[in-house]
Amino acid sequence: MEARAPLPEEPSIDIVDESFIGVDRAVVAREVALRWPRWWPGLRLEVYMDRGAEGMRWTVAGDFVGSSEIWLEEHTPGVIVHYYLRAEPTVPGSNTTPRPRANTRRAHSQVEGLRRRHVLAWKQVVWAMKDELEADAHAYR
């Protein structure tokens, strides 16, 4: 029997979210392309794959180090915005050095607090975009 390589450890911050926006996918893709640089002031995102109407992928540095993605899935009569963030918190003062993991209740609580704040910030971003784009779409009907 062949030995298997160990599976990579899951990231400390592993966010998966889906939100529906009731407008054409191309409109959402255009807005994501325009807005993403303003969404995360504590993060430096570098596009490594612009997938056009299907979304974008980024490398992440800053408060976290890892990767992020927005995938836009056409879902008549609109689009499902899938958001992913897989990252590690960074060492204070570094934009790229992951914080060593500590298996303590306090460390888990700190990471959970960071994850929760980022999830809430993402929901504010996507819901604001949803409200604006859907209002604009209804105004032109």
Image: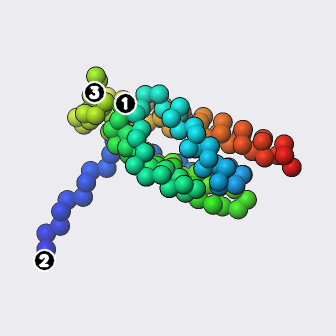
> Would you name the residue on which mark 3 appears?
94
Q: Residue at label 1? A: 63
Spatial CA span between label 2 and label 3: 43 Å
Bin the neighbour count of mark 3 within 10 Å (Cα to Cα): few under 14, some 14-19, many 20 and up: some
In the depicted structure, whether residue 10 falls above or below residue 60: below
Q: Quadrant of the N terminus?
A: bottom left
Q: Is residue 101 above or below residue 17?
A: above
Disc 1: CA contacts within 10 A as few (<14), some (14-19) or many (>=20) = many
Task: Find residue 79 and report its horizontal and vertical position in percent.
Answer: 65, 55
Q: Determine whether the residue tagged by mark 3 lies in a helix, strand or loop.
A: loop
**Mark 2, residues whose alpha carbon is within 10 Å: few (<14), some, or many (≥20)?**
few
Residue 13 seen in this snapshot: no
Q: Is residue 29 above or below residue 115?
A: below
Which residue lies under the disc numbered 2? 1
Q: Mark 1 vs mark 2: which is more N-terminal? A: 2
Percent from the top left, x then y, of residue 137?
78, 46
Mark 2 in CB contact with mark 3 (< 8 angstroms): no
- Which secondary structure lies at badge 1? loop
Query: Does residue 118 appear in the picture of this structure?
Result: yes
